[in-house]
Image (cartoon, helix red, strand yellow):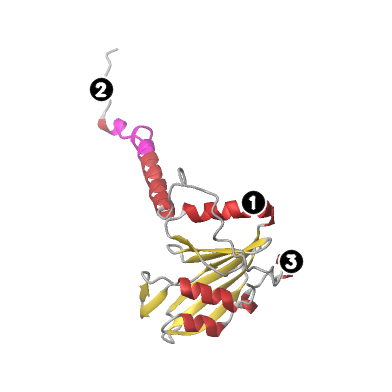
């Protein structure tokens, strides 16, 4: 029997074309997601360690221990402090805890007295007592991993602000507080992603009276 060239439709089968194409698309998508997630990260290879200047020497201990904190943290937030931190903000609503994994509060800042113009923020508190023995090394490493990270003074045992993520992390004894601050809104439907909201996050943290 003479061998025959396969017809064009046979060449374009799922096994010969579609599977490789799907594989290429899959890895392309993964690469895009990784770039998005890791855009603020930097290599820690070759960096020097051992700096403890970020440790807050005036820390006197927790005002409340982790076990004393409720699952719903919204009662610790001060609406007036949040409003003062945001130009054009007119009200704040609190959603309460919706995660069984941590103690938290979800809140929304409304702008221009328009219920459709709001941006969400959040506060999470998680138990990190397992790293108590080496927490200083752990937090130094955290800071060095991100380009936009900077230390914040006089909050807890130590604090780091991640500008790109609009996130403030505060180390307490046995737990960590993470505050994600909403960006500002300069006009209706116009979110200001360029202005640093570190001061707003710090104001929110201080209003909680936990530090």
In the rendered view, tell whether residue 66 sits above or below residue 129. Answer: below
Quarter occupied by residue 146: bottom left
Left or right of 186 on screen, residue 208: right
Q: Which mark is residue 134?
A: 1
Quick check: marks 2 and 3 in contact, CB under 8 Å? no
Front of the two marks 3 and 1: 1
Which mark, by number, is residue 67? 3
Image location of residue 170, percent across then percent down:
58, 65
Give the mark, 2 or 3, whose residue is nearer the N terminus: 2
The residue positioned 39% from the left and 46% from the top of the image is 31
Residue 17 belongs to the span the image colors magenta: yes
Element on which disc 1 rests: helix
Name which residue lies at 25% across and 22% down: 5
What is the spatial separation of the Cα atoms under label 2 and label 3, in whole angstroms? 74 Å
The magenta segment is 9-21
Query: Label 2: few (<14), some or many (≥20) within 10 Å?
Result: few
Q: Quadrant of the C terminus?
A: bottom right
- The mark found on residue 5 in the picture is 2
Please, which residue is most extreme toward the right here?
67
N-term mark: 3 or 1: 3
Per the image, label 2 sits on a secondary structure element best described as loop
Tally the numbered discs.
3
Prevailing secondary structure class for the magenta stretch in the rendered image:
helix
Q: Position of residue 84 (x, y in %)?
A: 48, 84
- Identify whether 7 is placed above or below 129: above
Image depth: mark 2 or mark 1 in front: 1
Q: Nearer the viewer, residue 127 or 122?
A: 127
Could you tell me residue 6's position as x and y percent? 28, 25
The residue located at (48%, 75%) in the rendering is: 200
- How would you rate the neighbour count of disc 1 (Cα within 10 Å): few for under 14, some for 14-19, many for 20 or more? few
């Amino acid at each position: 029997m003479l061998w025959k060239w396969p017809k064009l439709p046979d060449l374009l089968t799922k096994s010969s074309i579609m599977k490789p194409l799907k594989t290429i698309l899959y890895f392309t998508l993964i690469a895009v997601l990784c770039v998005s997630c890791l855009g603020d990260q930097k290599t820690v290879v070759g960096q020097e360690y051992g700096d403890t200047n970020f440790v807050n020497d005036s820390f006197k201990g927790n005002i409340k221990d982790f076990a004393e904190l409720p699952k719903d943290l919204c009662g610790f937030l001060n609406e007036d402090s949040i409003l003062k931190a945001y130009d054009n903000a007119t009200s704040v609503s609190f959603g309460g805890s919706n995660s069984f994994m941590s103690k938290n509060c979800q809140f929304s800042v409304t702008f221009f007295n328009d219920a459709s113009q709001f941006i969400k923020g959040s506060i999470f508190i998680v138990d990190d007592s397992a790293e108590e023995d080496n927490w200083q090394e752990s937090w130094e490493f955290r800071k060095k991993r991100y380009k936009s990270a900077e230390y914040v003074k006089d909050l807890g045992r130590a604090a780091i602000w991640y500008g790109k993520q609009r996130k403030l992390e505060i180390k307490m004894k046995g737990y960590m507080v993470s505050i994600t601050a909403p960006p500002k809104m300069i006009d209706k439907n116009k979110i200001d992603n360029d202005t640093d909201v570190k001061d707003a996050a710090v104001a929110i943290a201080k209003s909680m009276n936990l530090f």
